[in-house]
Image (cartoon, grey):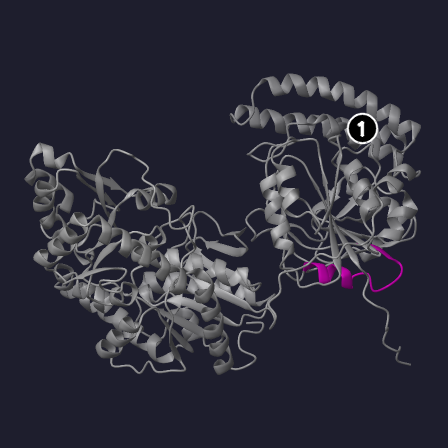
Amino acid sequence: MTAAPSLAPAPRVSIVICTDGRAAALANTLRCLLFLDAEDFEVCVVRGPTEDGIAEVLAQWDGRIKHARNPERNLSVSRNIGIAMAAGEIIAFIDDDSLPEPAWLEQIRAAFDEPFVGGASGKVMDHTGYRAQHLYVTVDRLGKANFDLEAPADYFNFPLSFSFPHALGCNSAFRREALIAIGGFDEEFEFFLDETDVCCRLVDAGWHMRQLSDAVVLHKFLPSAIRNEDRVTRVLYPVLKNKIYFSLVNNKGHYPVRRAIEDMTAFVAEQRNGLLHHVNAGRLPASDIDRYDADADRAWEDGLVRGLAGQRRLLRPDTEAAFRAPFLPFSRLVPADGREVFVFVSQEYPLGRLGGVGRYIHQMARGVAAMGHHVHVLTVGEGHDRLDFEDDVWVHRMAPHPARQTPTFDVPPNIWDHSSNMLRALRGIAQRQRVSAVYAPIWDCEAIAILADATFPVVLGLQTTMRFWLDSKPEVAVDPDQRRYFFEPMIALETRMLREAAGVHAISAAIRRDIVQAYGVALDPPRTTVLPLGLEDWADPPGTQAQLRGDGALRLLFVGRMEARKGIAVLLASLPDLLARHPTLEVDLVGDDTLPGPDGQPYRVAFQASLSADLRARVHFHGKVDDGALRAFYRDCDIFVAPSRYESFGLILVESMMFAKPAVACRVGGMVEVIEDGVSGLLAEVDDVASLLAALERLISDPALRARLGAAARARYERHFSPQPMAEGIVAIMRAASQRAGADTGRGA
């Protein structure tokens, strides 16, 4: 006979987070919960005694989550408060330094499909995100774990079993009815063996523990009051005391007390040797050994007395009454037309090398995530593969790996290795989520392995290409070996990607037109969409023109790499006349000023040598700066200049427009689509010192014109270059590419 399908509603879930001293991590975990695929759950936060901005974090979530305070630094007390607060039939525990994958809660909830299931645990990945910390684990009644299992330990689900299935606290869930029946957590366990004791008592009470191969949580394992930055536990009294206490209260006749004491003796020695290893390595002070010995003596006494007495400190009725509250549904971030999974590939991304492409893909990824979609970024890492959740985006930083397969077409080895590495990461994502589309820049053909794989629809972002870059580097293009083995294959790969990509995003009409002419490819709608870039507003308050230095100088700002393509030679050639005629003019040049010019020396070297001391003192080369300093330069300048020989778009112009600054750019490429000549800025002719000089003179000499153009620039930024229209447009482009590629593309690759 076939059982009739159950019509009972899925059990509601209460997610409990116990936190202390990690307000920033808690804020990130709460943001991660916004992207869970599950419905009908609530969030309960129990904070500890540490004051580290936690009140401000919780205030931002007031009315959306439940929260309570535990004045004692005792995890089991906090968890019992969480049980009392929870109104769901299932209580899921996650740590404040843990990040669940979108399917986590649905997969956890599915484990409770039978009434005898009292608890469940999912897979825990370590701080890298790519290595398992906990999967199928059993613990015996001496508190010793076995991590070598290759399948769930269901066969240990019977009362008084010597070993039993274990659930790690940062990814565990329990039926509320079962927790209440056994009295919740034993508050003797400040931390360490706390959830282990619960699993043991549940099994002894006849409940079953489920161990899942999915329900994945990423455990960042951050420093706390218990462990340091090297993940070394320094507070060891509870560890030692709880070990002997656990062995005694959960013995149930399995062994004589003598065996528990012998095992504890070995454990104390093992912990001391581990501590000594860290002291010898310089990770801990020598005084930690003396403290350990004192703690061990105290732990022996307290653990033996309390364990032999067998008087547990369980969930009290007054705690249940004090913190009981009705179910509070957690509102998730879900687009009206449904969530999708979008992947962005960029070797430039924050924390690493960052140019224009990295900056706008960072903005694009965050903008799409802000709409409620699942967003992954694949980028370059160091040492080992690493996964983080940053600004609502899953960031995969992949260490370099040689490609496992040889390409069937001509591609430079370093390009193929990088692209194959990105494909490897993409396939890992697709094992757990259906990927709708992948976005990648044309530069360096980062997605060539993904395109050749033909599993995932690729949207190609158009910026400066290798052919255009070579046009600005004639001294590089003459090397015949480089042309044959690198430049010509790269241009051929660019051509292939332009022809085969499921979607094409042109960041300006100019770049689309120029690529069509240079590569002889068709880039027509609907496959190709022209969509300008957008950036978040850096100005504070919006449109501010306040001067930071207050020295009365009139400041001219240049931002960019000091290379020929950025027109730095033209700007430097114009400065001596400007400086001589305008004694209050100061010039700030921000960006890499170490790049060699045509003569092999940086432009800065020859320029500074050509100026008199008084003029040289008014031209400031600042080199690379961080975002905070860059914002200050924009805010502090009076005029912005970008004399580039070519820009596919011109993000630096948008950045200056945020701050209501009048800009001088060149009449070429995408810059003519950003700047309205005579309305929000001025356009000079390319490679023309006289034209650039005339435009700068107009602005330097006319404060009213500067104010008018600056105000118009700010208004134009708000209308055309804010991040939301770009994010919405990118989603539309990627969805259309996915539809063209076929409904099943990217599933389970």
The answer to whether residue 640 is visible is no
Residue 734 pos. (x, y %): 47, 73
* Residue that appears at 57% across and 27% down: 277
Residue 594 pos. (x, y %): 21, 44
Q: Tell me the kind of residue under disc 1.
A: Glu
Residue 385 pos. (x, y %): 49, 52
The image shows residue 477, relative to residue 261, as above or below, that is: below
Taking the image as shown, residue 422 lies to the left or right of residue 560, namely right
Is residue 605 in the magenta section? no
* Residue that appears at 32% across and 64% down: 444
Residue highlighted by disc 1: 262
Taking the image as shown, residue 465 lies to the left or right of residue 424, namely left
Is residue 107 in the magenta section? yes
**Residue 268 found in image quarter:** top right
In depth, the one of 407 and 183 nearer the eye is 183
**Residue 433 found in image quarter:** bottom right
In depth, the one of 348 and 118 nearer the eye is 348
* Residue that appears at 75% across and 30% down: 71
The residue segment tinted magenta is: 104-119
Element on which disc 1 rests:
helix
Label 1 crowding class (10 Å Cα cut-off): few <14, some 14-19, many 20+?
Answer: few
**Residue 671 found in image quarter:** bottom left
